[in-house]
Image: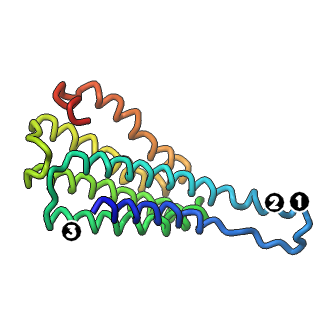
Amino acid sequence: MLAFSDGLFAIAMTLLVVGIGVPTLTDGGDEGELLDAYGDLVPEVISFFISFAVIGRYWVAHHQFFGFLRAVEYRLIAINLVYLALIAFLPFPTGVLGNYFENPISVATYAIAVALVSGLEVVLFWRAYHAHLLVREMPESVYRWGALASSLPVVFFVLSVPVAFLSTGVAVVFWFLAAPVQLLLNRFRPAEAADWF
């Protein structure tokens, strides 16, 4: 299951670059025209790197999660497939974001897609905890803290949706606010969490 997941992550991360269109020039030897075309691609390149980092973060978290498991079962596999479907879908909103960065609908579409992926991470964790699939019994306080920490991206991506209709740039900044809040949340991490996270 992990090998299948890794393959899908690799394909999704590779497909992100397909969203960056190769410039079409009227004069292939004109350096200025090519530089102008490169300038037009800046939003697509930025969205590529944002999504590569986002999917890379999900890949690392997915591996960490599977390191906690002693077994898998049908429901966990089914949830994982839905999770992977959303990972595979991410190149589409990434491409839309790169082409229409100033359009709030493109920013909102991307934010909702990423929020759904993050939400499914929480659901995978919930299922593993309640189905007793973890390598050992996790204290409830550690589970609650882990579920809360995993929910932070969901909150910030969802909050960015209405903000996108005021300013797409500010909405994107919202995506990165989860990191400092996570650092603050780490101050309240249960001592036993060090054995898990």
Identify whether 68 is placed above or below 25: above
As helix, strand or loop, the secondary structure at mark 2 comes to helix
Q: Find residue 99 and report its horizontal and vertical position in percent.
A: 61, 66
Identify which residue is drawn at 90% across, 72% down. 27
Q: Find residue 28 and report its horizontal and vertical position in percent.
A: 88, 70
Label 3 CA crowd tier, 10 Å (few <14, some 14–19, many 20+): few
Is there any visible trace of residue 100 in the rendered image?
no
Amino acid type of the residue tagged 3 in the rendering:
Ala
Q: Are marks 3 and 2 in contact (CB under 8 Å)?
A: no
Number of numbered callouts drawn: 3
Identify which residue is drawn at 16% across, 52% down. 126
Nearest to the observer: residue 100 or residue 162:
100
Q: Which mark is residue 69?
A: none
Q: Nearer the viewer, mark 3 or mark 2?
A: 3
Left or right of 106: which side holds 116? left
Mark 1 to mark 2 CA distance (whole Å): 6 Å
Amino acid type of the residue tagged 2 in the rendering:
Asp
Amino acid type of the residue tagged 1 in the rendering:
Gly
Identify which residue is drawn at 14% across, 67% down. 74
Is there any visible trace of residue 86 in the rendered image?
yes
Residue corresponding to mark 1: 32
Nearest to the observer: residue 73 or residue 122:
73
Residue corresponding to mark 3: 78
Label 2 CA crowd tier, 10 Å (few <14, some 14–19, many 20+): few
The image quadrant of residue 188 is top left
Residue corresponding to mark 2: 36
Q: Find residue 60 and report its horizontal and vertical position in percent.
A: 37, 47
Q: Are marks 1 and 3 in contact (CB under 8 Å)?
A: no
